[in-house]
Image (tube, rainbow, N blue to C red):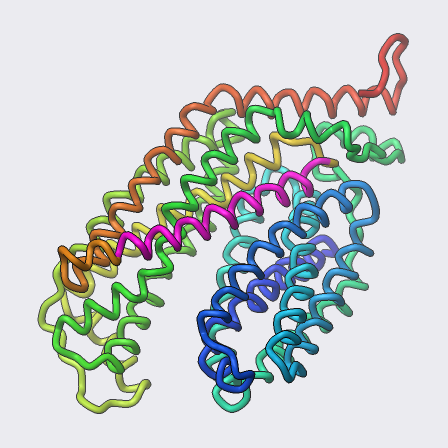
Amino acid sequence: MRASYTYLVFVSLASLDNAAAGVLPPLYAIIARDLQANEAMLGLVTAVYVLIAAASAAYWGYRGDRSNRQRLLLGGTLLWGSAMIATGLARTFPQFILCQIVTAVGVGSIASIGFSVISDVIPARRRGLALSLWGISQSLGAAVGVLLAGMLGAFDWRWPFWFIAGLGFLFAFLYFFTEEPQRGQSEPELQALFAAGKTYDYRITRTDLPVIFARRSNIWLSVQLIFATLAFGSTIWVPRWAIARVQALGYSLEVSTIVGNLFVILFSAGIFMGIAAGYVGDRWQQRDPQGRLKLAMWGAFGSIPFFMLTFFMPISGVSLPPGASVWRLSWSVFVLLLTNRSVFALFLTAFLAIGLLAVDAPNWAALITEANLPEHRGTVIGLTRIVRAISNAVSIALTGLLLQLLTQQFPPPDNYAWGLALFQLFAIPAGLCYYGARKTIPADIDAVRHTLQQRAATAVQPLKGIKPE
């Protein structure tokens, strides 16, 4: 019961760090007007925020692998919560930038230390399922940030920042009632050690870093992450594609913006297939050392044709009430989903595309967890955050450039459709990375298990001639 409570608190914290990041973009225009800045500079603030949060995640992860994770995570949460309050108090643009930088530094703690704690709280046999909920919570957190920006930010842009900070402080308080898991406590190979009343005392050192960088599984999974993020990062333009699709039917930009984003929200429901994917990955891995790897590979390959179909599928027979409110338009979209064959077909195709894409995240996270020692996991996930952030920035920028070039050949929405479809081809090398790692990852997982077994045996019943590694 205590472990479940700890898990829920950490999942909630993971959603809040994404809410803190997601609240800013919808408020660009209002903040720019109030602080006498321009929207382009605020876009740069977001880019810097993402990169600093990723870089700080690597630092926090390394510190967490060396010392008490509970104190570090509490400090990181209080840091970003305080910085969010200060953001709302900012009166000049330089003050705003400084507060957001400090927020990013604190937020990085949740990504890496929180991940490390989750890997110890949840039993290994349910790791994929637990990490799927961890990943989905982050997506929902970003959506909550956008929602709060729209609901509270329209009256005063400062309130969403204060509200999220308040939630952060609340969960920092709840964190006092969680249990600090022992490092490695979820590993089956260490159960004899804990049953004997001993602890797993290994901690990362600087000499471990070359070993982490050289581990072939980490290399394969990092390269896979680069290609997967290049494909996924482009989807930030999907709302613009959806808006252009509705505009092409003859509706105004205002109506198209509402309806297009409603379509995107409905299509995004496929992300919940990640929960089933995490569960299936857990079960498959127990029977086959390549189980997770195969599932993630076919998820990457399978998403490609469905994404491409989504971007080019025709829509017909769409009728929306003129001059309707947001609620009436929302109801009209829901009715279209149930009554219009072309809209339902588009929804089903997009649902499958996103659902297959969601197969990758929990199984990738479980693989990189199992291929690394417990005292290395926070550092490893922090380093991969840097890889993800850089790849995501490159993807968004390149997609924007490609869309500009395609506009010369194809009018909207065709330019968006072709640009987004072409970027999904990056999922092919992402899937091939899994194929290339089909022997490496199981071997590294076995090596980790062997090391843990040896350390447990040495600690419980020291054997002559065997030294702890």
Task: State the count of labels.
Answer: 0
Which residue is more in the foreground, 65 or 343? 65
Q: Position of residue 106 (x, y in %)?
A: 70, 61
Which residue is more in the foreground, 169 or 48? 48
Above or below, 263 relative to 129: below
Identify the residue at horizontal 80%, vertical 43% (top origin): 182
Above or below, 337 relative to 183: below
Which residue is more in the foreground, 118 or 433? 433
Q: Kindly report the secondary structure that dominates the magenta region of the rendered protein.
A: helix
Residue 137, quarter of the rendered image: bottom right
Q: Position of residue 198 (x, y in %)?
A: 88, 34
- Residue stretch in magenta: 376-403
Task: Indicate left or right for 183 with 318 as reference.
Answer: right
Residue 141 in sight in this render = no
Q: Is residue 383 magenta?
A: yes
Q: Quadrant of the N terminus?
A: bottom right
Above or below, 195 relative to 95: above
Identify the residue at horizontal 20%, vertical 52% (top origin): 418
Identify the residue at horizontal 59%, vertical 84% (top origin): 159
Identify the residue at horizontal 19%, vertical 72% (top origin): 246
Q: Position of residue 52 (x, y in %)?
A: 62, 56
Q: Quadrant of the C terminus?
A: top right
Q: Is residue 230 magenta?
A: no
Task: Indicate left or right for 324 with 161 as reference.
Answer: left
Task: Indicate left or right for 402 with 15 as reference.
Answer: left
Above or below, 191 relative to 163: above
Residue 335 in sight in this render = yes
Residue 185, quarter of the rendered image: top right
Report the residue that reaches farthest toward the top. Answer: 465
